Amino acid sequence: MRQMYDPEDAGFENEPFDLDDVLWVRGVDYLAGWRDATDAGRALVDALAAAGVDTTGFRWQASAAADGGGRLRVVLPAAAAHDVAALVRAVSRLGKAS
């Protein structure tokens, strides 16, 4: 996975070295994938905040895969994970009720 950090991101500590992180394939648009993942990360955090989830302590990292597709890594506090799970269950129940 090609690592490209969001300018607002402090990064992730203790990341192991991965040779694939430093290899680039000519003609693959990694930047487009990173931009897509960056936009997705911001949209995800904004949507969760709008739904009432406390996003304090969320960290996310945009990157691009070997094929140039965007990837997003999200780290969040356990309490927030419980809130997200409850939100998904509530939305799922709404879908089944219709």
Image (spheres, rainbow, N blue to C red):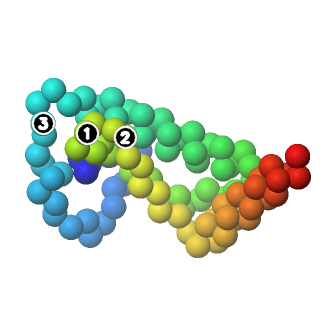
The residue labelled by disc 2 is 70
Give the crowd class for mark 2: few <14, some 14-19, many >=20 residues within 10 Å: many
In this rendering, the count of numbered labels is 3
**Mark 1 residue type:** Asp
Q: Residue at x 68, y 49 (%)?
A: 49
The residue labelled by disc 3 is 25
Report the residue that reaches farthest toward the bottom. Answer: 78
Which one is in front in this view, the residue at disc 2 or the one at disc 1?
1
Q: Disc 2 and disc 1: Cα gap in Å?
A: 9 Å
Q: Element type at marker 2?
A: strand
Q: Do callouts 2 and 1 mark residues in contact (Cβ within 8 Å)?
A: no
Residue 67's disc number? 1
Image position of 75 with respect to 29: above or below: below
Q: Element type at marker 3?
A: loop
Q: Disc 3 and disc 1: Cα gap in Å?
A: 9 Å
The percent coordinates of residue 70 (x first, y second) are 37, 40
Q: Element type at marker 1?
A: loop
Residue 20's disc number? none
Q: Is residue 10 toward the left or the right of residue 45 in the image? A: left
